[in-house]
Image (tube, rainbow, N blue to C red):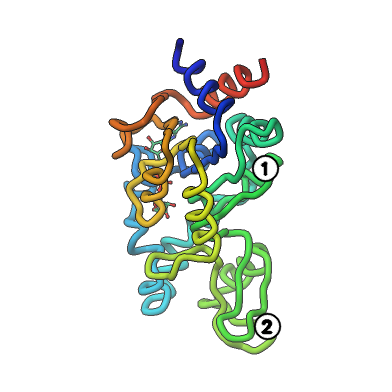
Amino acid sequence: MDQFEKAADLLKHAKYAVCLTGAGISTESGIPDFRSDRGYYNTFIPEDALSVGVLESDPQRFYKEGYTILKDLEGKKPNPGHRALAEMQKGGYLHEIITQNIDDLHQQAGAKDVLQVHGDASTARCERCDYRCDFDEFDRHVEEGDIPPTCPKCGHEMRTNVVLFGDAMPPAFDRAVRVAEKADVMLVVGSSLQVMPVAYLPRMAEHLIIVNQGATPYDHTADVIFKGTASDVLVELEKRLSE
Ligand code: APR
């Protein structure tokens, strides 16, 4: 039985299979990841540049540095890996997709029940009156030098809905924990599984399938490991499932 047959067999016979994705599923869409040699960590430390501390103490730095991660998402499109996961959901082989990514490429690819446990870059909010706007409106403020962006309704400071380092985890994470507890199979794609508390989730699943070029702390316990390119592996896996 080859790796694909083993992985397909686990997904076909799963009672409740879920997926957890990280930045590695979006690199083929032109979005850098964080910790590989082409990642953002080579230019700045996201724990710092994308932190509530820097947003509050040095907004000019926040909008010049960490904010570029949000700007990089503009115009990016799903790749065959995102589409293959959406097809696996449609075929009933996967339930929720828990993602650490702040892009909306899973949703653009047709996936449902996407739990964005690190928030999303496509919306922003006022910290006082809860006025909400899309990224384009928010970015216009930044481009016009309105830093930090001010709410058009009440004049208070606005911020992105991305979960920054130092933020509390959003309600989507509580749902992700419940879903991971229910799962007997978890398909992990494109994450180094270094960042807690999300990196605890794979521990809850009985069976792990990992698709990741780099090493993860779960490699020694996974049932199946693919070190290949996410889209190639997921397209082939989806094909085996629909055979
Ligand atoms: N195919 C397979 N694996 C890939 C691909 C690809 N095309 N591209 C990158 N990878 C792998 C890398 O080898 C790496 O191990 O994806 C992994 C991405 O890991 P990270 O860069 O650490 O990204 P992620 O795990 O999503 O980071 C989690 O850290 O900085 C915070 O909030 C940020 O959500 C992010 C969190």
Residue 36 shows which numbered tag? none
Numbered disc 2: secondary structure: loop
Question: Where is residue 204 drawn, in percent x and y?
Answer: 41, 46
Residue shown at 47% from the left, 49% from the top: 181
Specify the quadrant of the image occupied by residue 206.
top left
Q: Is residue 205 left or right of residue 81?
A: left
Disc 1 within 8 angstroms of ligand 1 (CB) = no
Disc 1 residue crowd, few under 14, some 14–19, many 20+, Cα 10 Å: many
Residue shown at 47% from the left, 67% from the top: 63
Question: Where is residue 226 drawn, in percent x and y?
Answer: 42, 24
Residue denoted by label 2: 152
Q: Is residue 137 above or below residue 70?
A: below
* Of residues 54 and 129, the one drawn nearer to the viewer in this rendering: 129
Label 2 with label 1: CB-CB less than 8 Å: no
Eye-nearest disc, 2 or 1 = 1
Specify the quadrant of the image occupied by residue 209.
top left
* Of residues 73 and 6, the one drawn nearer to the viewer in this rendering: 6
Q: Earlier in the sequence, mark 2 or mark 1?
A: 1
Q: Looking at the picture, which amino acid does disc 1 mark?
A: Ala
Question: Where is residue 218 drawn, in percent x and y?
Answer: 32, 37
Residue denoted by label 1: 111
- Residue extending farthest bottom: 154
- Residue extending farthest top: 1
Q: CA distance from mark 2 to mark 1?
A: 33 Å
Quadrant showing the C terminus:
top right
Q: Looking at the picture, which amino acid does disc 2 mark?
A: Pro
Q: Is residue 95 left or right of residue 60?
A: right
Question: Where is residue 14 drawn, in percent x and y?
Answer: 55, 32
* Of residues 32 and 111, the one drawn nearer to the viewer in this rendering: 111
